[in-house]
Amino acid sequence: MAYRLVKREGIIILEINRPAIHNAINMEVLEGFKELVHIVKNESSIKLAVITGAGDKSFCSGGDLTVLHKLKTEQESYEMLSDAATILYDVATLPIPTLALVNGTAVGGGCEIATLCDYRLVKKGAKCGFIQGQLAITSGWGGGTYLWEKGLRLDHTLQMLTESIPYASDQLLAIGWATEVFEGNKYDALETFIQKMIVPHESVLKAYKMQLIRKWQQTKLFERIIEEVRTCSVLWEQEAHHQAVDSFLSKKK
Ligand SMILES: CC[C@@H](C(=O)O)C(=O)SCCNC(=O)CCNC(=O)[C@H](O)C(C)(C)COP(=O)(O)OP(=O)(O)OC[C@H]1O[C@@H](n2cnc3c(N)ncnc32)[C@H](O)[C@@H]1OP(=O)(O)O
């Protein structure tokens, strides 16, 4: 399967399982995110949702370009991007904290997924970035909008989006994107982090997460994400984008 869902001791872990292509996202993985949301909403004892990638190289390399590159027009890309953005909004607004266990490279949509989470534990040496600019598009799954919500300095936020390059883990910590940087086994790092943050009563975690969700509702986060999607779909149709993706897929980059 393209993803694995594991539950243990009040935690649910979604592992994207396509390591041969750096855990790129296809429709099956998006179904995995939907399943994650369904489970959390129906099992009140779950306190934390974790997203990670299989293998030791990558967290996620974004949309699977071999699949998504079949979409050519603004309308076709808008449908895909808005569907994905809606599923990911449901993940971001889960009634419990979410955590990206960034076990390696997170680029493009992969960086967007890590950004929408409440916490990011980043493996030392991992590189993460909004590289969409190299493909002549902007972020299209809501990741730019989430990044503006993360309390980073505004100049750092704009730099991260416009430089379109992956940042090293230490830089990600310095600008405040990474919550913590870890070395060694990712599940040991998760365990250590959880011991600090999980309180005995899940109702406390849920109450604090609700404060954040209320702020996002009041500031029309979802509407702002859909504007981001629309901008990306306009750029998607341009020849510059298709040429950049062709170039990556044929390794002429
Ligand atoms: C659609 C949503 C949009 C958004 O809103 O953000 C996006 O996500 S656009 C996609 C953005 N992602 C990318 O552009 C990432 C592309 N990948 C890379 O830059 C690199 O692969 C890497 C992740 C930095 C790793 O580099 P390296 O270690 O040198 O490995 P390879 O490049 O040789 O990759 C091995 C293998 O995996 C395939 N691959 C990697 N990423 C993707 C992807 N996103 N979609 C499809 N396939 C991908 C790559 O083509 C190689 O395949 P083979 O040559 O067949 O082995």
Image (cartoon, rainbow, N blue to C red):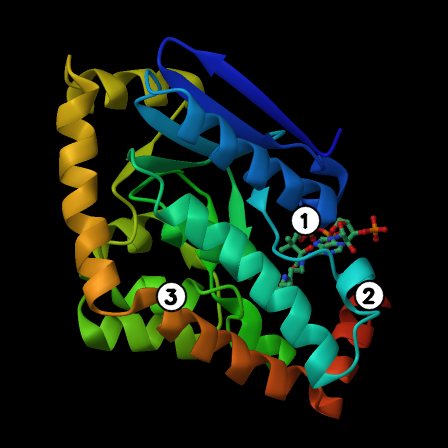
From the viewer's side, name the closer residue of 170 and 225: 225
- Label 2 and label 1: CA atoms lie apart by 13 Å
Splitting the image into 4 quarters, where does residue 107 fall?
Answer: bottom right
Which mark is on residue 165? none
Q: Nearer the viewer, mark 3 or mark 1?
A: 3
Question: Are the residues flagged by discs 2 and 3 in contact, CB closer than 8 Å?
Answer: no
Tag 2 residue: 249
Indicate which disc, 3 or 1, sits on the residue closer to the N terminus: 1
Q: Nearer the viewer, mark 2 or mark 3?
A: 3
Secondary structure beneath disc 2?
helix
- Estimate the x, y position of residue 66 in percent, counting from the top left: 82, 60
Badge 2 density bin: few <14, some 14–19, many ≥20, Cα 10 Å: few
Secondary structure beneath disc 3?
helix
Q: Is residue 81 left or right of residue 111?
A: right
Tell me what residue is drawn at x 21 percent, y 15 percent.
195
Tell me what residue is drawn at x 75 percent, y 73 percent.
245
Tell me what residue is drawn at x 28 percent, y 69 percent.
220
Mark 2 residue CB less than 8 A from any atom of ligand 1: yes
Q: Residue furthest top?
A: 9
Tag 3 residue: 222
Badge 1 density bin: few <14, some 14–19, many ≥20, Cα 10 Å: many
Q: Amino acid at mark 3?
A: Phe
Q: Amino acid at mark 2?
A: Leu
Tell me what residue is drawn at x 57 percent, y 67 percent.
82
